Amino acid sequence: MRKNKLLLLLYILSAITVAVICYVSFLYWQGSARNYEPPNHPSVSPQERAQSDLQNLSRAAEAYFIKNMEYPGKLELLIPEFIDQVGYDPLSGKTYQYSLNETDGTSRYRISVPDPKLYNAKDFYIEDGKLFQK
């Protein structure tokens, strides 16, 4: 009698072990890469992306000025301390244009998209932290 109870307990434990292994295998299969769906990001228009890029570059140029008491001669000087990369205009695929004007001891910078006509604008730039799109 005692041997039968021990054998029954062994069968029950074996069945539970098999059930747990099957359940874990099922969960593992469900979590595979082919079943992964990345989260949906809200789509951003190329114009909004360009505006955001120009504002980020402008903030980086201002941070450079605070640290060095002068604006950078080119955008590449902002890498890697202030930005990771300069980035590209979403519509033209070209890098943003940067110019620095120094008159009467005052420096002014301008960062613009390479071809504003792609945005149906005559001008599309940020100058001294102010965004202009005409």
Image (cartoon, helix red, strand yellow):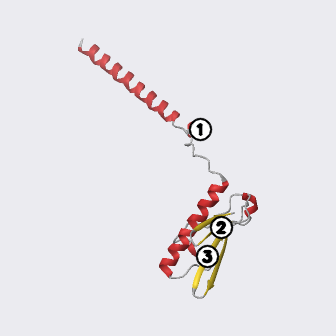
Q: Residue at x 76, y 61 (%)?
A: 117
Q: Is residue 115 above or below residue 8?
A: below
Q: Position of residue 16 (x, y in %)?
A: 37, 24
Amino acid, disc 3? Tyr
Q: Is residue 49 above or below residue 103?
A: above
Camera-side mark, 1 or 2: 2
Most extreme residue toward the right, as rendered? 117
Q: Residue at x 61, y 76 (%)?
A: 109
Does dot 1 land on a helix, a strand or a loop?
helix
Camera-side mark, 1 or 3: 3
Looking at the image, is mark 1 or mark 3 earlier in the sequence? 1
- Which residue is labeled 3 in the image? 109
Amino acid, disc 1? Arg
Looking at the image, is mark 2 or mark 3 earlier in the sequence? 3
Q: Which mark is residue 125?
A: 2
Q: Which mark is residue 90?
A: none
Amino acid, disc 2? Tyr
Q: Is residue 83 above or below residue 102?
A: above
Q: Are marks 1 and 3 in contact (CB under 8 Å)?
A: no
- Which residue is labeled 1 in the image? 34
User: Which quarter of the image is occupied by the C terminus?
Assistant: bottom right
Taking depth in this image into account, of 67 and 117 the one nearest to the observer is 117
Taking depth in this image into account, of 38 and 4 the one nearest to the observer is 38
- Mark 2 to mark 3 CA distance (whole Å): 10 Å
